[in-house]
Amino acid sequence: QVQLVESGGGLVQPGGSLRLSCAASGFTFSAYAMFWYRQAPGKERELVAAVTNTGATTRYADSAKGRFTISRDNAKNTAYLQMNNLKPEDTAVYYCATPGLDSWGQGTQVTVTS
């Protein structure tokens, strides 16, 4: 079965960094684009970053540009989101997803506070 498992979230101070990981299984990982979304309490899910199946092209929300980096290692069936210079407004549950399979992970909590 298709599974996506996020990890790497936690509590961090403003200006700090976290690296999120998404372990994928149950499908041909290299055939699908990967996405990172986030959802804060009371807000809709927001697309943060996306990467094509080969990793050749990436896209970011304006709020993430210059601070976040999405990447993938197809040999390891894993996607990553490196988050630097974190801000309180980055606080949310972060999800990886494969929209082509309508598949979502369980999410990992990121909390940015002083």
Image (spheres, rainbow, N blue to C red):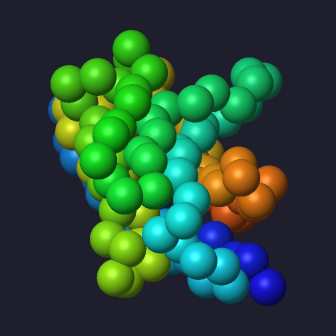
Q: Residue furthest top?
A: 62
Image label count: 0
The quarter of the displayed image where residue 75 is located: bottom left
Q: Is residue 81 above or below residue 92?
A: below
Q: Position of residue 108 (x, y in %)?
A: 57, 58
Residue 40 visible to an observer of this rendering? no
Q: Is residue 12 left or right of residue 39?
A: left
Taking depth in this image into account, of 85 and 33 the one nearest to the observer is 33
Q: Position of residue 106 (x, y in %)?
A: 70, 63
Taking depth in this image into account, of 12 and 106 the one nearest to the observer is 106
Instruction: Name the residue located 29 percent from the left edge and 22 percent from the top edge.
Output: 65
Q: Position of residue 33 (x, y in %)?
A: 53, 52
Where is the C terminus found, in terms of image quarters?
A: top left
Q: Position of residue 5 (x, y in %)?
A: 60, 73
Taking depth in this image into account, of 43 and 3 the one nearest to the observer is 3
Instruction: Name the residue located 22 percent from the left edge and 39 percent from the top edge.
Output: 84
Instruction: Name the residue located 53 percent from the left edge and 72 percent from the top edge.
Output: 29
Q: Is residue 78 left or right of residue 105?
A: left
Q: Is residue 99 above or below residue 67?
A: below
Where is the N terminus found, in terms of image quarters?
A: bottom right
Q: Is residue 74 above or below residue 80?
A: below
Instruction: Name the residue located 45 percent from the left edge and 78 percent from the top edge.
Output: 77
Residue 86 visible to an observer of this rendering? yes
